Amino acid sequence: EPEVTQTPSHQVTQMGQEVILRCVPISNHLYFYWYRQILGQKVEFLVSFYNNEISEKSEIFDDQFSVERPDGSNFTLKIRSTKLEDSAMYFCASSEGTGRETQYFGPGTRLLVL
Amino acid sequence: GESVGLHLPTLSVQEGDNSIINCAYSNSASDYFIWYKQESGKGPQFIIDIRSNMDKRQGQRVTVLLNKTVKHLSLQIAATQPGDSAVYFCATLLSGQNFVFGPGTRLSVLP
């Protein structure tokens, strides 16, 4: 069964450093998403991406964040200058269509900012 | 603004019993709802969804009930099994692709 994959599974970084989280969505999906989940808290929407551009983003997704689809398979989330409060689990998801289409989540990348 | 919440943070049930997990939402314009299951160390996994033009939807061992009058959503799991132990989230569609998740209920299945 096709699945969303994410790398790395764990990332430790120093405050102020840049990190890139990588995702490979399901191959025939057209919509891609990033969510984050701070430890013990609920899943929060960050951004959605379609047709090589951001289609929607939340208040959390400020100028420190960016997303890119550098090739036909990868979808990345970059945090330019990490802060302690960026420590969280970051989930990538993809769907065939938008809105009421099922989103399939990856296993997540656990980011720890020291 | 939209908020989605749960009535109970934890739920313990005996194996074989039925489980009911509840969720409340605040935006009456919400028209699509999903239940996710999240096992430890994994991403959320889609269980079942329901649109606002329905009151009930059934899947394999799971049923979702939607009460739009009181803005309440529930997930019923029949004959709960040890493999059902996980955190369960409800989520509602706030706008085009922006899903709002509830904080989650941890379901523990007792032998």
Image (cartoon, helix red, strand yellow):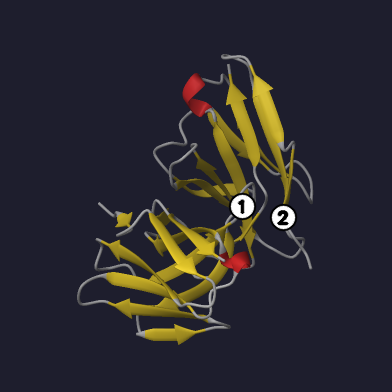
How far apart are the alpha carbons under marks 1 and 2? 10 Å
Label 1 is placed on what type of residue?
A: Gly
Q: Are marks 1 and 2 on the same chain?
A: no
The subunit letter for the residue under badge 2 reads A
Q: Nearer the viewer, residue A68 or A10?
A: A10
Disc 2 crowd rating (10 Å Cα; few below 14, some 14-19, many 20+) is: some
Residue pointed to by mark 1: B43
Number of the front mark, 1 or 2: 1
**Viewed as shown, does residue B106 lie left or right of B22?**
right
The reply to whether residue B14 is in sight is yes
Give the residue at x 67% y 49%: A107
Where disc 1 sits, the SS reads loop
Give the residue at x 28% y 70%: B72
Give the residue at x 37% y 72%: B74
Give the residue at x 48% y 74%: B49
The subunit letter for the residue under badge 1 reads B
**Viewed as shown, does residue A53 lie left or right of B49?**
right
B82, above or below A37, in the image: below
Among all residues in the image, which is located at the extreme front?
Answer: B111
Whether label 1 touches label 2, CB < 8 Å: yes
x, y percent for residue A89: 58, 39
Residue pointed to by mark 2: A4
Q: Nearer the viewer, residue B64 or A57?
A: B64
Disc 1 crowd rating (10 Å Cα; few below 14, some 14-19, many 20+) is: many
x, y percent for residue A76: 68, 39
Label 2 is placed on what type of residue?
A: Val
Where disc 2 sits, the SS reads loop
User: Which image quarter is the C terminus of chain B in?
Assistant: bottom right
